[in-house]
Image (cartoon, rainbow, N blue to C red):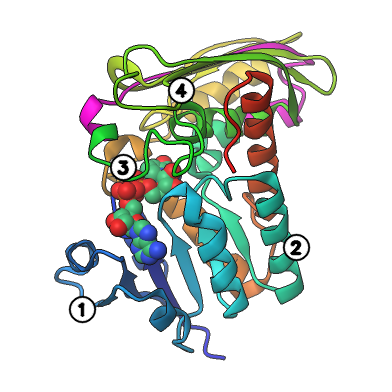
Amino acid sequence: MSSHLNHAVIGCGRVAPNHLDAFTAVPDTSVTWACDRDLAAARALAAGTGIRVTTDLAEVLADPEVTSVSVVVDHAQHAEIASAALRAGKHVLVEKPLAMTVAEGADLVALAERSDRVLSTVSQHRYDPVVLAVREWLAAGLLGDLVSGSVTLQCGRTEDYYRDSYWRGTWRGEGGSALVNQGYHALDVVDWLCGGLSVVGAATGTTALREVMETEDTLAAVLRGTSGTLVTYSVTVATAVPWRTRITLIGTAGTVVFDLDHPGTLHFVEGGPDLLARAEELRGRVIEEPPAGIGYYGVSHRLQVADFCAAVRHRRPMLADAAAGLGTLRLLRELYEVSGSHVAV
Ligand SMILES: NC(=O)c1ccc[n+]([C@@H]2O[C@H](COP(=O)([O-])OP(=O)(O)OC[C@H]3O[C@@H](n4cnc5c(N)ncnc54)[C@H](O)[C@@H]3O)[C@@H](O)[C@H]2O)c1
């Protein structure tokens, strides 16, 4: 097989430009198909690029030149499309969440293993320089033992955002809202940094946006790490602020406060001289790339896509591998269950 990778983007909506941008940036890699059941959306994504467009997923999967696909559609179809692509021998990068249910997600992970294909769920913020730095500091013991944490995401989604979408704000199409969609990344990153969390308690509410959604616009929870770390987690999509995260991690030897905004920023650090020196070094780094598409998605799609292509080429493990996507899916489904919210089928 030639080492050139040909990639197809399935679903050409809001976040698809990030996939096109990121795969185009990888050497020896081309995006060759834009597929959307709405031809106008596929054409809009492909405009000026020479990329072929289609409304027919089967046409893309039957193309032997296609090595990999991005699944960038509503949550309800992730499992079905990812599974069809794996069965067609393609490597798969699926937007978050991996699937609607843990059972579907586990089936996908097993299928990828059996077919010897790379499967990864988009967790671009795991690749943010500030997140990678905090992970290194934790691993080096610079924060001591983690005892406490807090995670907040406030973001603003208008009534039209839900009203104009065929899937958002519905249990059937989105499988939840504030948590599974906007809150996904903060949960994913903190679960990863804390080495795995489980749910102590959770509650959901639908307040300001109740006219336009059947799912939650707000969720608050308490989570616990394996060695006892207690983390409060809250997300709401019903504010005037487009996007603001704050993550505080408190250890016996140090504290950090950072965000998953763009670019990710370290706001506060307290601890020993080694931690302070590393924080200074991080603050000195500049992220120059402009993000593709919507700014608050950040630039780290490029980093994850480069990791994905390297995994396809060299069969090396990814930072955000198939198990990572399944782990986060398990935690967020547990949050919905504990909160007593409708569990999507
Ligand atoms: N990683 C991130 O930061 C980030 C940001 C936004 C969205 N997302 C995720 O990306 C996914 C898509 O979100 P979006 O905001 O781009 O949605 P969107 O509604 O804007 O776009 C979805 C597109 O998929 C198309 N589609 C639906 N079914 C199809 C099918 N069977 N075949 C081909 N095309 C089909 C629709 O016509 C639509 O154009 C979701 O999983 C969402 O959670 C991730």
Furthest-left residue in view?
48
Depth check, mark 3 against mark 1: the one in front is 1
- Disc 1 residue crowd, few under 14, some 14–19, many 20+, Cα 10 Å: few
Tell me the number on the disc at residue 110.
2
From the image, tell me which residue sits under label 3: 288
Residue at disc 3, CB closer than 8 Å to ligand 1 = no
Estimate the x, y position of residue 250 in percent, counting from the top left: 67, 11
Q: Which residue sits at x=37%, y=32%?
A: 263
> What amino acid type is highlighted by mark number 3?
Glu
Q: Which residues are magenta?
A: 134-161
From the image, tell me which residue sits under label 1: 50
The residues bearing labels 4 and 1 have C-alpha atoms spaced at a distance of: 41 Å
Depth check, mark 2 against mark 3: the one in front is 2
The residues bearing labels 4 and 3 have C-alpha atoms spaced at a distance of: 36 Å
The disc, 2 or 3, on the residue closer to the chain's N-terminal end is: 2
Depth check, mark 4 against mark 1: the one in front is 4
Furthest-right residue in view?
227
Describe the element under mark 4 as helix, strand or loop.
Answer: loop
> What amino acid type is highlighted by mark number 1?
Gly
In this rendering, position of residue 173 left or right of residue 111: left
The residues bearing labels 3 and 1 have C-alpha atoms spaced at a distance of: 28 Å
From the image, tell me which residue sits under label 4: 216
Q: Is residue 166 visible?
A: yes
In this rendering, position of residue 241 left or right of residue 314: left
The disc, 4 or 2, on the residue closer to the chain's N-terminal end is: 2
